[in-house]
Image: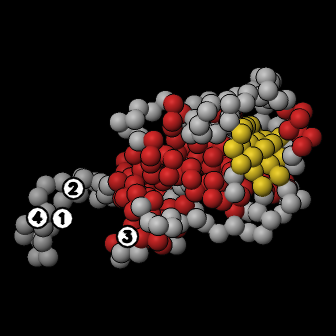
Amino acid sequence: DCAAPCSLACPARLDIPAFIGHLAAGRHREAIAVIKERIPLPAALGRICPRYCERVCRRAGRTYLSADGSQPAMPGPQEPVAICALARFAADVDAAEQEPYVPPRRAATGKRVAVVGAGPAGLSAAFYLLQDGHACTIFDAHSDPGGAFRYAVPESRLPKQALDADIEVIRRLGAEFRMNVRLGADFALDDLRRDYDAVFLACPRPGIKADRRTLRTNLEGVFAGGKAVSGPDPGVRAVAAGHLAATCIHQYLSGHEV
């Protein structure tokens, strides 16, 4: 089947027609499940995403005529579908539920992953690795997780309550957070390599270079992505980078070629 232009334009490859279809039918639980297959921080991104998807929406700029073609069915050229607003709505409705949607988690593998950096890339990586059954510990120098979403985006654009709701789902999946600790000052990379089966560096580290396709570094079991490889990214690109990291690390931990 052909993919919708909006889904192709989304760096995270969100299945936009599917989640909007569920919303239109009143199936809110199914909608948020589709969204979280690709977007682990939907309440946050629904507010601050650059909206690449809406730039290519086929509805934008079109004039729709009546059935007989004699007059416009709707006044003037149309705006794109408000995809981000719909995703935000789905996330906010879910967060208000007594039991917000938490994706299912596979059986524990016994593998442990250290994630350095609790920004969007690190949170995204943990979100997917936890679903694959791996234990994840997230390290960050700040007092609260969220990275740039928390400390660089104004509260007026991204309320902390919305971001915290997204992060709470990652906690419920089993993530362990170790805050107020800095790599190189409070612990060393060699410590993580000794204590964990894999390490994901989501924050820049001097001397660490990674393959942009596999995210593997020159150090065995160490992967780097997001800001650690490409510099600051709009949120949705960082989330996509975290998903890629989780995929590569899962393959590595499963004994498959990355």
Q: Are marks 1 and 3 in contact (CB under 8 Å)?
A: no
- Residue 92 screen position, x and y as percent: 40, 57
| N-terminal label among 2 and 3 | 3
Q: Identify the disc placed on residue 150.
A: none
Between label 1 and label 3, give the one nearer the viewer.
Answer: 3
- The residue that mark 3 highlights is 23
For the residue labelled by badge 3, is the local secondary structure a helix, a strand or a loop?
helix
Q: Quadrant of residue 88?
A: bottom left
Image: 145 above or below 108: above
Instruction: Calculate the distance from the C-alpha at mark 2 to the C-alpha at mark 1.
Output: 8 Å
Cα distance between the residues tagged 2 and 4: 11 Å
**In percent of the image, x 87 and y 49: which residue is there?**
197
Q: Is residue 137 left or right of residue 8?
A: right
- Reading the image, the residue beneath label 2 is 78
Whether pointer 4 and pointer 1 mark residues with C-beta atoms closer than 8 Å, the reply is: yes
- Taking the spot 89% from the left edge, 43% from the top edge, the residue there is 195
Marks 2 and 1 close (CB-CB < 8 Å): yes
Residue 72 badge: 4
Residue under label 1: 64
